Structures are given as structure tokens and as C-alpha cells.
Image (cartoon, rainbow, N blue to C red):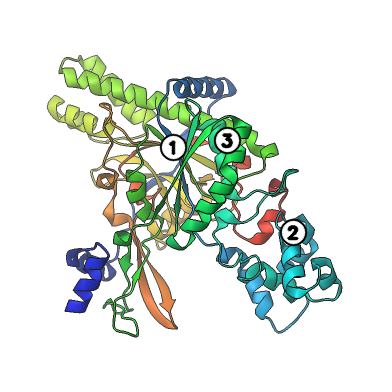
Amino acid sequence: MLNNNDLQQIASRGITPEQVNHQLEQFKTGFPFLRLEAAASVGNGVLAPSAEERQRYVDRWNQYKAEGHQIVKFVPASGAASRMFKDMFAFVDADYDTPQTPFEREYFDGIRKFAFHKALCEKCQANEGKKLKTLLEEGNYKAVARQMLVKEGLNYGQLPKGLLLFHNYDDGPRTPMEEHLVEAALYAASNGEANVHFTVSHDHLELFKAKVAEKAGKYAEKYGVKFNISFSEQKPSTDTIAANPDGTPFRQDDGSLLFRPGGHGALIENLNEIAADVVFIKNIDNVVPDRLKEPTVEYKQLLAGILISLQERAFEYLRLLDTGSYSHAQLQDIIRFVQRDLCCRKPDIKQLEDADLVIYLRRKLNRPMRVCGVVKNVGEPGGGPFLTYNSDGTVSLQILESSQIDKKNEEYMRMFTEGTHFNPVDLVCATRDYKGNAFHLPDFVDPLTGFISQKSKNGRELQALELPGLWNGAMSNWSTVFVEVPLSTFNPVKTVNDLLREQHQ
């Protein structure tokens, strides 16, 4: 099935023929659905700390920062903003010239509120010979929309979200990239330094670097920190082969194989290269102006405080097990910690002999740990927190997407649709073991949690293989804890009109 040209193409990407054949086999076999016990909720897998507890964890985090640990803010930022402007692309191509849909009317009614309004007006003047206001008065709405989207205009149809102007300030508008630098200074700085890592696409790398060079000094001076800003790209070796509907390799017009990015799950390789004691993970578009940052900062510190408190206890127990000298009561204490605090339960644990019990406890304690903020479900799309059965027979907390759930199972679908919380991608992670060594994160991926989606290329149907998602199957074998955080900390921007919401003004 694979010819010599294919083998050369595969090798050039850092992929082996065995990997490709395995992926092609996955198109035929598919992926198993996960077995669910329940949707996680407050009192059943989701913590809701009191005000007093929150303050204690925030204080613990600030103490930890003062101890000089290595902290990194990891921001997936490779997505292009094109989907934000889907409706405006449609308007430009429509057979009418004035706003007709509610989306189009909302956009033009609120156009002066956008942080990019001034920049757009300048592009209209430069390229259309008229100010934005004049074009609108003349009814030339499409010219305004085009100047926002096209390359010679603002180029927002092609730029990454991280480099769009999101929020207005007295000293000028800010991009999401800048808002993440500010966040890092507020809750992730240690010893006067803030480490921020952006994952970006190859096409946008130089643009990001240029914007950082232009802006970072301003925020370093304002917040009294030194920024260490780094970038990485999704590795070609994490791309997956595309297949025809019959499962055979999809070939392009020149006969070559088509490889596609394997989804955000590929970023586990990038995260694996981050040298840090604690890593914050948050999507590029989930940012708010300074006037609304206080809850975000408080709850980020809360999540981090819970993480290091749990990690310290896990480390203590691992060192105790290392001594080989522990009582039955101490083992029972460790079991309670794993089951209650780390939310990992083994139904038949009482049947284990002491030697097997210690091996089991060590395995569950000595692995990466993440504390995930979850918000109350208000109908936003996104994965949800669940108690699921794992391949080793344990029940633990996982973040699931709808694609991982058997749609024919009415009980599971009821759990998914009636779940009280969902995942806003708000994670704080610990990726070093109790001896200070970095975990090899790909070892903790569940390879059976990928999924297959239907796409097209030049009008031809194809199947695409998505790797286990970064906060889904790629972290399946981590210790996971869910904490309820307020909805005010979740303000994603999916369409350009989301920037008109009060939270982005």
C-alpha cells in the first residue's frame, strides 16, 4: 500500500511506516467509547472550597512562589482567527450589500466598540480613500468588512487570534498575547521573573516574535518583572495520515499522501519539553480586560495552591513507601488520600495483598498531576468532567468530549446533556516526580481515546484522525482534581461579535 515515495515522505516528517500503518488500521477499527459512572458534580468529584479555604490555598501558592520554584504559563496559540470571521466572510460574498442577518447588524451597529476600530479606520482611509464612517454613511458596508479581512487591510481573516486587537485601554488596545503576559505577571511570576510559552503555527511564529519584541518591555516595566518568553511549533511527527472513506490512504493530485495536524493533543509533545515545577495552561482567547481580572487571578492562585498541597502529600506518602517501613494504619491513610483527595477509586482494592497494594498505590501517586477549573454548565460547547472507568479497572476523573461518548447509550447521553459543569481549559499541572525528575508525559497518554472526524479536501471527502486531546486522553493517566470556578473566569472569543460582550469592553 505504501510505495518508495511514500516511505521517503513519511521519513521526512519524522514518522515511521509502522505508525502510519497503525493509523490506517485505526480508521478501520475506530476507537472504543468510554464507560461512564457519572457526570462529576459538587460533592461527587468537583470541589467547591469555602472563602476561608480559598484564602488558605492562595496564601500557600504565594508562599510557594516566594520559594523560587520554576513556574511556566503555557498558552496554546496556534489557531488562526478565520473561524471568528466566518459570518463576515459570508457577508462579503453575499448577493446583497447591506447588513441583513442579526449577526451582520450587530457587527456594524457595534463597530465603534471594537478595539480594532481605529486601526480599521486607518486601513479604510489608506486603501479605500475614505474614512470608515464615510464608507458606512455611503452604504459601502462590504468595503469596511473587506478591509478587516484581507491581507492589504487588517488581515484578520488570516492572522492568529493571539495577535488581534481584543481590548481597549487608555494607552492603546491590547492583543490576547499581551493579556497573557499581564496574567503571568499577576499570578505566575517567581523571583521577579515570569515564564510564558506560546505554541504557534510555523506561519505565525515571526509575527508573534515581532509583537513580543514590540510589547513585552512595556509590561515588564509596568509590573516589575522580567519576561522569559518562548515559542514552539506543533511537530510534523505528530501529524496523522488522512484516509479515504474506505480507509485507504488519501492521495493528493500529485500522488503524495496527505498528512493533517493531529489536533491539540499533539501539544503533549510540546508540553513535555517544558522544564517547570508548575505549568498553567489556558487557551489564547480566554482573556478579559484588567478591570475584570481579579477573579481570574484569585482562582488561578487557588487552583495552584490546591495542586501543590496535594502534591506535597503525595510526595510524603511516596517517601514513606520508599522506606519499606509503614503500618497498616498508614496504608489506610494513603488509600483514603488516593480515593478521596485524588478521586481515584479501585472497587476491588480490599482484595489486594499488601505487596500488590503498595505497587498500586505507588503507581497512582507517582504520576503527573493536574487541577482543573470547571464552570457551571450554561450551554457553551465543550468537554465535561466525568467519573469514568479506566482500562485498569479504576474509576477516576476525566474530561470528555461528546465524540468519546456512545450516542446510542441513552443513560450516557443524559449524563452528558444534564451535566452540571463543563471544562473551560483552565489547568494547573505538576509534571515532576517526588525526586525532582521530569515525567515523560507521552507515557501517560491513553492511545485509545482519539477519534475520527469527517473532512474534505478540494471537494473530496476524507477521514481525519485526531490524537487524544491535550486535556482529554493525552492526560488520561494523570491524577486529576476538579474545582468549581466562577463563570466570570471563562470568556472565550469564538466569533468577532463576542468582542462586543460586556466582558470584553
Crowd class of label 2 (few under 14; some 14 to 19; many from 20; radius 10 Å): some
The answer to whether residue 104 is visible is yes
Horizontal arrangement in the rendering, residue 423 relative to residue 431 (left or right) = right
The image shows residue 126 at horizontal and vertical percentages of 74, 69
Q: Establish if 462 lies above or below 211.
A: below
Spatial separation of the CA atoms under disc 3 and disc 2: 27 Å
Q: Establish if 458 lies above or below 405.
A: below
Quarter that holds the N terminus: bottom left
Crowd class of label 1 (few under 14; some 14 to 19; many from 20; radius 10 Å): many
What residue is disc 3 on? Answer: 220
Tell me the kind of residue under disc 2: His
Residue at left offset 74%, top offset 59%: 117
Q: Earlier in the sequence, mark 3 or mark 2?
A: 2
Tell me the kind of residue under disc 3: Ala
Tell me the kind of residue under disc 1: Val
Residue at left offset 75%, top offset 58%: 118
Numbered disc in front, either 1 or 3:
3
Q: Are marks 3 and 2 in contact (CB under 8 Å)?
A: no
Q: Are marks 2 and 1 in contact (CB under 8 Å)?
A: no
What residue is disc 2 on? Answer: 117
What residue is disc 1 on? Answer: 72
The image shows residue 35 at horizontal and vertical percentages of 33, 51
The image shows residue 9 at horizontal and vertical percentages of 25, 72
Q: Quadrant of residue 311?
A: top left
